[in-house]
Every structure is written in C-alpha cells, then in structure tokens.
C-alpha cells in the first residue's frame, strides 16, 4: 500500500496545477500532459513497490518452509532411528524363532521404505529448488557398497529374491562423490528392481570402471518394461503400468530423483529392458578417482 | 586368556538428547565397548576431558544446536584436538551441514542408522591414522 509520505509527495507535486485550476477555472498550459505523466510515474512507482513487497513476503514464506522442512525431518528421523536401530539390533544379536525373525524383518523393511519415501520427497524438492547439489567428498567405495547391500538385503530375503554383487577388480578404494546421494540412488534402484521381480528371481549390483568414470548398474530378472514406457521412465510421478497391483505402488518420484542426482554429478542414467526378461538401469559418475585399489 | 581379552576395551562417549537413542546405543554397543551415553549439557565438556574416551558420538541435528558448541569447545583443548568425533545427524544433504562438519567432526553417520552400519563407522573411526 502507498504510504502516507508517498501520498503527501504526490499531492504536493500536483498542488500548483490544482491551485491554478481553482483560480482560473482552466488547467495551465501543458499541465494536463504533466498530470498524465505524473500519474503514469506514480503508477509505475506503485507497481514496483507492490512487487518488492510480494517478493519480501515470498522470502518469508520460503524461509518458513525451509525451517518447517528441517523441523519435520528432525522429528521424523529421530524416532525412526530408535525403531530401526532396535529392530536391527534384535535381528543381529538375538536367538529368534523363524516366525519372530520374519515379522521383525518385515517391520524393518517397512521402516526402510518409509524413510526412502520421506528422503525422496525432501531431496527431490530441494534439488528442484536448487537448494541441493552433488558434493565431491572423499568416500570409501567398499564401505558405500556394504551399506547399500546391508540396507537392501533384508528386503530381498523377505521377497525370496537373490541379491548379488559384481564388482570390477580394478575398482578404486576411494572416490570423490556425494555419498548420501549415491547411497540413495542405488538403494532406490535396487528397491525398484525388487518390486518388479518375482520370488526366485535375482537382482544384481554391478560396479565397474569405464574410462574416467565409475559405472554403476542394477540389473534384474523381473517383468521388464514395455518399450513405449522407456522414454518417460525418469519423469516426475511417472509409473509404469503392468504387473500386479502390489507391484505398482509408489510415488513415481524414485527414478526422477535418481536422474536428478546422477545429473547433478555430471553423469547420465540409462535403461535397457525387455518385457518378460528383465531390466538394467545404469549410470556413470565421471571424474571420481583418487587412488588405486590396494592389493 | 586370548589376545582379545588382553586388549583393553575401547571407550565411547555418546551424546544425544533423545533418550531412546541413548538406550539403543548402550544396549547394542556395550558388549564391545565401554560406553557412556549422556544428554548434551554443561557437564559434557568436563566428561570428555576427564574420561578421555577413544571416540565421541555426537548428535548434530539442528543448526546452531548445542552439539556444535560442544564440538567447538572440545577442539579448542589441545589435548583433545585429535579425539575422533563421529557426528550423528539427520542433516546430510543441505548445504550448511558440511561446512558445520568442517567445524570439528571427523566423519558422520546419517540418521536413521542400523546398528551394523554404526559399528562399521565406529571401527573405521577408531583405526589408527
């Protein structure tokens, strides 16, 4: 809104012409055009002020959104730490009946799925807003792969699917990449592969060196993807039709997030699939090497 | 007596305001380590200086939280500058976190974590440099 001060300025600027009009009954020569110009100038000035105020409000809302995101993430993740930690502790260190182990694994698997969805939602939003980019930190490759297989092995066992790894012998010991993003991408791809593979099938994580890049691939023996869906596979909210109802659940954000994360590293993600035979999703991460693998 | 019996157990100090997480860490790690779990508070810097743990597990969750102050305070003491500190955090993908990590943590583990991963991180952090 126009402040009192600004209104006073406008009034004072127009006042000589107004006094002249009341004195003579006519507008002074050139006054009409001056009044029009002043009115236009005032209008432009008003629009600029309103835009600045709107931008300031948007900044306040954006700051509030970020604060709420951090608070929500903290309040959701801390209790989940206790739940997942206790479940994994009991599963690792206790003597359990087969039924108890199965139920606890199911609970842990559900918690993991919950966290994957939460993190995908938050991280996708951040990447779209430009608030998150891929970092280049030193990370231990074997430790990353162990973490990923640890997080997904339980789900694979529960579903009766064999989870394998195929690691190139010339894999470097360390690499420069964003450990959090890579972990998320590969867990997403493996979880997806498990979702679209029947019991008795297999999912494998392949890691190799290609030129100056590390190449990752997740390959499954699942239902495959019809060719007509491949082009849009990494689009936002895109879900492939096919398979039974239980296979189709999901937000449609997982592969979109994977694409954003891989492209943030300067890499490219690809899919090769054949209906009824399986799917292979691969991506490369360029410029990652630090030192050779120790023999 | 085996070699493992002869070696003194490594000691850990875990600092987290969440009571359930303190119980989880104590129950899951006390078989392998001497672990003390405490909430963050004014007595903690003194505990670190007096007990001289082999590793500190420190919750860093909210920007500007007391965890950062504790870490900075520990690093100011010459005797504790090489003390390994492992951040436990829900923050791992926002831009400010890694600048904060540079304020004194050696590495971090994301929450929620599973115990097997925590144990690997601890073993890695306790390896001699």
Image (cartoon, rainbow, N blue to C red):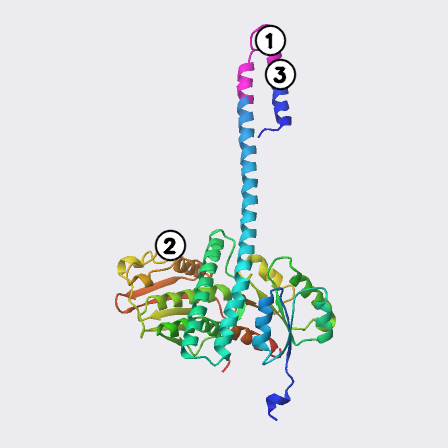
| x 59%, y 71%: residue | B23
Tell me which chain the residue with mark 3 is part of. Answer: A
Circle 3 Cα neighbour tier, 10 Å, few/some/many (<14 / 14–19 / ≥20)? few
Q: Which mark is residue A22?
A: 1
Q: What kind of element bears circle 2? A: loop
Which of the two discs, 1 and 2, sits closer to the camera?
Answer: 2
Circle 1 Cα neighbour tier, 10 Å, few/some/many (<14 / 14–19 / ≥20)? few
Q: Which residues are magenta?
A: A14-38
Tell me which chain the residue with mark 1 is part of. Answer: A
Point out residue A89 in the picture as x, y percentages from the top left corner: 51, 75
Cα–Cα span, label 1 and label 2: 67 Å
Q: Is residue A293 visible?
A: no
Q: Is residue A206 left or right of residue A142?
A: left
Q: What kind of element bears circle 3? A: helix
Tell me which chain the residue with mark 2 is part of. Answer: A
Q: Nearer the viewer, residue B111 or A46?
A: B111
Q: Residue furthest top?
A: A24
Q: Is residue B119 left or right of residue B85?
A: left
Residue tagged 3: A15
Residue A37's image quarter?
Answer: top right
User: Are callouts 2 and 3 both on one chain?
Assistant: yes
The answer to if A232 sits in the magenta stretch is: no
Residue tagged 2: A237
């Amino acid at each position: 809104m126009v402040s009192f001060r600004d209104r006073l300025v406008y009034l004072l600027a127009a006042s000589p012409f107004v006094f002249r009009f009341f004195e003579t009954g006519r507008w002074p020569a050139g006054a009409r055009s001056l009044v029009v110009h002043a009115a236009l100038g005032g209008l432009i000035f008003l629009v600029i002020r309103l835009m600045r105020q709107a931008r300031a409000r948007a900044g306040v809302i954006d700051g509030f959104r970020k604060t709420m995101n951090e608070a929500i993430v903290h309040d959701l993740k801390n209790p989940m730490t206790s739940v997942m930690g206790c479940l994994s502790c009991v599963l690792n260190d206790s003597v359990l009946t087969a039924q108890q182990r199965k139920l606890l694994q199911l609970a842990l698997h559900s918690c993991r799925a919950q966290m994957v969805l939460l993190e995908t939602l938050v991280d996708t939003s951040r990447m779209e807003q430009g608030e998150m980019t891929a970092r280049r930190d030193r990370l231990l490759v074997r430790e990353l792969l162990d973490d990923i297989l640890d997080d997904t092995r339980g789900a694979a066992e529960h579903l009766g699917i064999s989870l394998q790894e195929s690691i190139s012998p010339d894999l470097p010991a360390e690499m420069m990449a964003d450990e959090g993003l890579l972990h998320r991408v590969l867990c997403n791809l493996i979880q997806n592969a498990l979702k679209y593979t029947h019991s008795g099938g297999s999912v494998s994580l392949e890691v190799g060196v290609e030129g100056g890049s590390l190449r990752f691939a997740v390959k499954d023996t699942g239902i495959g993807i019809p060719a007509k869906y491949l082009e849009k596979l990494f689009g936002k909210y895109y879900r492939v039709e096919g398979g039974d109802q239980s296979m189709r659940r999901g937000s449609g954000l997982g592969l979109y997030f994977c694409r954003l994360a891989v492209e943030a590293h300067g890499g490219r993600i690809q899919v090769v699939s054949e209906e009824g035979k399986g799917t292979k999703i691969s991506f490369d991460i360029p410029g990652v090497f630090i030192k050779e693998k120790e023999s | 007596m085996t070699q493992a019996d002869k070696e003194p157990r490594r000691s850990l100090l875990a600092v987290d305001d969440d009571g359930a997480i303190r119980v989880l860490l104590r129950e899951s790690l006390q078989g392998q380590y001497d672990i003390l779990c405490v909430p963050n508070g004014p007595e903690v810097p003194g505990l670190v200086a007096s007990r001289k743990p082999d590793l500190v597990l420190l919750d860093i969750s909210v920007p500007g939280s007391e965890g950062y102050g504790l870490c900075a305070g520990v690093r100011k003491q010459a005797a504790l500058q090489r003390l390994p500190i492992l951040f436990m955090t829900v923050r791992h993908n926002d831009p400010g976190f890694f600048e904060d990590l540079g304020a004194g943590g050696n590495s971090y583990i994301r929450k929620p974590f599973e115990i097997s991963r925590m144990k690997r991180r601890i073993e890695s952090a306790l390896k001699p440099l």
